[in-house]
Amino acid sequence: MPASRAPRVTIKDLARGLGMSVATVARAFHPGGAIAPGTRAAVLRRAEEMGYHPNALARGMITRRTGIVGVVVSDLANPFYPAALERLTSRLQRAGYNVMLVVTEPEGAAAASEAAALRLLLSYQPECAIVLATTLSSAASRACREAGTPLLFLNRHPGDPEAAAIVCDNARGGAAMADHLIDGGATRLAFVGGRADASTNAERRAGFLARCAERGLPAPCEWPPEGREGAFTYAAGQQAARALLGQAAPPRAVLCANDILAIGFQEVARDEFGLRVPRELAIAGFDDIPMAAWPAHDLTTLRQPVEAMFDAALDWIGRLGQGIPFPAAPLRLAGTLVARGSTPAFSRDTHLEKETSCSMP
Amino acid sequence: MPASRAPRVTIKDLARGLGMSVATVARAFHPGGAIAPGTRAAVLRRAEEMGYHPNALARGMITRRTGIVGVVVSDLANPFYPAALERLTSRLQRAGYNVMLVVTEPEGAAAASEAAALRLLLSYQPECAIVLATTLSSAASRACREAGTPLLFLNRHPGDPEAAAIVCDNARGGAAMADHLIDGGATRLAFVGGRADASTNAERRAGFLARCAERGLPAPCEWPPEGREGAFTYAAGQQAARALLGQAAPPRAVLCANDILAIGFQEVARDEFGLRVPRELAIAGFDDIPMAAWPAHDLTTLRQPVEAMFDAALDWIGRLGQGIPFPAAPLRLAGTLVARGSTPAFSRDTHLEKETSCSMP
DNA sequence: GTGAAAGCGCTAACAT
DNA sequence: ATGTTAGCGCTTTCAC
């Protein structure tokens, strides 16, 4: 026998209780419903009394608007994502959507389980799926397309040109950091990357290296070296520090592809190499996770425009309900350089313009 | 016009395409279905070709088993919870459930929005709701009860005796920590609490104080003082350190109600008071968040039996499907003391027994 | 403004 | 083993 739960009050019960038809009762729950104000009030009052609550599943089946938004995450160990997930969920909730959470394995190995998880999500007919913090296997993307579920990448964007994306302008951020470090007096710079397959990593790196070249500096040294896999983790940051700072001519300023890397790097720089930050070594990160502001780290970083990204996402999702598909061109929003104690104070409080977008060819 | 999406392939389309009845087709998708193996194979093959995927909403309406599990979180800023959420979601997914995420405002102020969010969740007819990391307003609890949705508290338990709960044996954990610190040689102990209304806080404190008394020590000093609100945050840990370590006879060993507090405390102890840990001050936390193992913190802590808690939760949820309600008595599972460098090495690697339960009167 | 009827996509008795 | 029928709870024509 399946679960025997207390039967819920349905619209039928309510209609019976009121001596009305279900149609009338239903109209009371819809803004534009053609119903006499008095009738509506009566229905609402009785509903309250009887403890009636509409069944979203039944409603969703008919209207094809389930109010469900799928959110796919994979790297909750990076503090940036819990914070983002919390905000995103809050905002979707307030807009009347409900978040269905899908966690995919961080390592690509489990592409099969990822596809399974996504299929499960799709079976609930979400209005769209938001991919936070990870790329999706092509199998999973295809599944969405087949199911007709719009896909929105937040923070990263996949190779897939058909997918909509809202991202931080990572290249500009990387460039701004290069300026900041160079203005701080450094000439021997370094870049510490995370996962090579992440668009965030590639763009931040590209922006940083390009600006260094523009300003006539020698090419920064890099970690991880060609052919070696990086990661967006504390441990990877430590490793990078041991490698880069152990060199004959170690860098004097380092940009790490994200904050958690930078924090790991800084830890080793101080504890194992006895370097004073920022005097002997300047360190910067990317994201502005809460920890970055802790006195122990006091990390200069590029704050992602998270709220602006969510503003846009909610806007897009709202339009979806009116039949307007997601824009094809990725939306890039500029971040803010937050100068703290891990870099010299020369150009403190430089702020990038608050927001900017740029379209694709 | 509502969203015009590509119409999905339904079971009817599939039945038509196969020249069978919908009933037969449906049976192919159910394990015990009375259907010829050949027919099933044909259906499955054709389904694949036509891109048919069952609609979970429609199925849920009939079977009253939606496969949806609501998960309510509020404090994603505490690293313990993202990690727990990730694991819990993964495991539920693998068991065929889908997680609907509800984020409630951390501060009790927004009890109204909490109730609204929960109502929204309930309208999707979840099979149960798991409350992770927070207590629920009584309005919200009542809403669940009225809707007939079983409620399971994970990690905390509310005053509400009707609610099911799976928690770490916090009192024993607190006692184990007292032993560990006392065995390490300390006599002037302190306890730093978090939110006073959290059961975790109360239990850890009670266990700690009781054991101190049993071992004949003077009552540990405490923070926050009576009437002052604490919090489970880094900043609160810093504050506590400034208050406790600034005293005439500062404590030599401190148990913080969770790791993030302990890390904040430790930071201030080292940087502002110049104390050497663990020589001059022993510090311990509770939870074993990933950061606790970082060399910079190297924090002794009481690891919560997270996986065992989830084992039990999944077990209970599985039974729910067979009509077996959640047990009324809270399940308490013992944690493990993980001794690291922030406390003296005397009784390193003490492990509590792996698991224990205790019933309520 | 209200009611009757059809049906969303699927499952679960019933027949056969 | 398969088809027929009746719904799940709700929205949405269409009459009145």
Image (tube, coloured by chain):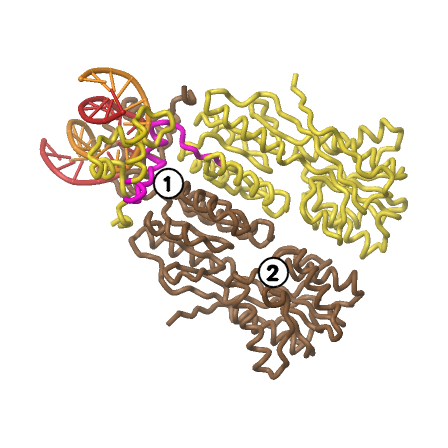
Chain colours: A brown, B yellow, C orange, D red
- B5 with respect to B106 (left or right): left
Residue farthest front in this picture: B38
Q: Which chain does the numbered disc 1 sit on? A: A
Residue A52 quadrant: top left
- Asked whether A264 or B235 is in front, the reply is A264
* Residue beneath disc 2: A230
- Residue A198 appears at what percent x and percent y? 52, 61
Q: Chain of mark 2?
A: A
- Of the residues tagged 2 and 1, which is closer to the observer? 2
Highlighted magenta segment, given as a residue range: B46-70
Quadrant in which the N terminus of chain A appears: top left
* Residue B280: % across, % down: 88, 48
Instruction: Pinpoint residue B240: horizontal percent, then vertical percent.
Output: 76, 46
Name the residue at 62% across, 66% down: A338
Residue at (51, 28) in percent of width and height: B317
Residue B289 shows in the view: yes
Q: Which residue is mark 1?
A: A123
Determine the residue positioned at 70% across, 62% down: A265
Question: Of helix, strand and loop, which one carries label 1?
Answer: loop
